[in-house]
Amino acid sequence: MMDSYRPKWLNEVPTPSYVVEEQRLIHNLDILKGVQDRTGCHILLAQKAFSMFHFYPLISKYLKGTTASGLFEAKLAHEEFPGENHIFSPAYQDKDFSEILAICDHIVFNSINQLKKFAPLAKAAGRSYGLRINPEHSTQPEEHAIYDPCFGDSRLGTKLSELEQALNEDPADEFLYGISGLHFHTLCEQGAEPLAETLAAVENRFGKYFDKLEWLNFGGGHHISRDGYNIDLLENCIKNIQKKYRLKVYIEPGEAVALDAGFLVTTVLDIIEATEQNGRKSAIAILDTSAACHMPDVLEMPYRPPLMNSGEANEKAYTYTLAGPTCLAGDTIGIYSFDKPLAVGERLIFGDMAIYSMVKNNTFNGMPLPTICAVDSTGKVELVREFGYEDFKMRL
Ligand SMILES: *Cc1c(COP(=O)(O)O)cnc(C)c1O
């Protein structure tokens, strides 16, 4: 992503603000629609990464539908996104299920227990339903276990042994309580090569049942809109499965839809002058945005978000630790350097802040939530949502 960027809208938005640019979304959506058009697969927006429904009408012109992690996301899609409405949850609740049946086209179950329990209702409602599987093939390093549904004791997905035991016990002549598809999701910010490898593992274990199915869902975690992603390999994976088994293929990326499409704009509130620490000199700038509250993945993943017009620590003349205004000692965003000293009142722009940001933020310490802004293709800024004290109080 570009790291020097001074957008025209920089001084038109309040801070802190998430600012999503329509043109950047369209850039990603064009790439995804290309895959969809050339292969015939259906691409779904995974709303958990990006639920800024202001853009759902736009996204729905490119992608076939959405997927939800539960009733609320499914409702949001039902209200705002014209398209297919898919849902997966590790465990559905009785009280939600009739509403889910009313609005979801595809329902994916996580376990045989859940499948047995809800399949009769899903069938009676004429819904297409399937089972999430665990291919037991990890393509992520051990440090990523928290993002790896194939790690040791993962609760996500049914293993082949469990599926076969259920097949032995299911006396009906239909296949496995009437499922019409299988779903796997094992990747996180990965290329097409780990997908190809995973698909081989899936085929190896579960391929013998594919002729009983109508669809296969490859999940999310595909970084399709990232520079250098091997789109040809992705398309070959999709086309092979579709042709060999006559299955409809779904993929449900979240990140790839809004990768690098948004920013978090913040103002410098105070500067604490440089002190010598472990032989390194670095001043601290306190911002009106917090890692803990407004970009929790920075601490959770953890990672150092890109910052426009800055360098690595000590790469440029003036180095600062950028930190939030909360009580958390570790509420630091990262160490960055600048050509000129930072000044109180100056604005800074973090990159790649559309995804897993506004869907995960919180009001710890009574921190205000950032305003949500959209920039349309003509450069016009719209304040989509502003938050205040009531948004803090109403949740407590
Ligand atoms: C998280 C998730 C996605 C989207 O993942 P991205 O990494 O944002 O592409 C899709 N499907 C399921 C089941 C998920 O849990």
Image (cartoon, helix red, strand yellow):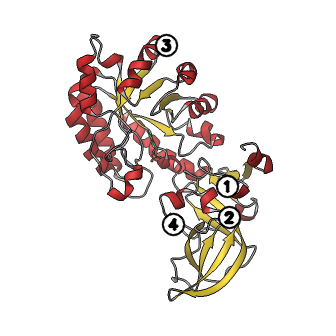
Q: Residue at x 31, y 27 (%)?
A: 247
Which residue is the site of mark 2?
326
Direction right: furthest residue: 389
Q: In the shown orientation, is residue 371 left or right of residue 349? A: right
Which residue is the site of mark 1?
364
Q: Are marks 2 and 1 in contact (CB under 8 Å)?
A: yes
Indicate the secondary structure of the residue bearing disc 2: loop
As shown in the figure, which amino acid type bears the numbered disc 2?
Thr
Mark 1 vs mark 4, CA separation in Å = 21 Å
Mark 2 vs mark 1, CA separation in Å = 8 Å
* Of the image marks 2 and 4, the number of the one nearer the N terminus: 4
Residue 2: give its label: none
Q: Nearer the viewer, mark 2 or mark 4?
A: 2
Give percent across and percent down for residue 168: 23, 19
Which residue is the site of mark 3?
125
Ligand 1 is found in the corner quadrant, namely: top left
As shown in the figure, which amino acid type bears the numbered disc 3?
Ala
As shown in the figure, which amino acid type bears the numbered disc 4?
Arg
Residue 386 shows in the view: no
Indicate the secondary structure of the residue bearing disc 4: loop
Mark 3 vs mark 1, CA separation in Å = 42 Å
* Of the image marks 1 and 4, the number of the one nearer the N terminus: 4
Q: Nearer the viewer, mark 3 or mark 1?
A: 1
Q: Quadrant of residue 55?
A: top right
Q: Quadrant of residue 74?
A: top right
Residue 304: give its label: 4
Mark 2 vs mark 4, CA separation in Å = 18 Å
Indicate the secondary structure of the residue bearing disc 1: helix
Q: In the shown orientation, is residue 119 left or right of residue 74? A: left
Q: Is residue 160 above or below residue 351?
A: above
* Of the image marks 3 and 4, the number of the one nearer the N terminus: 3
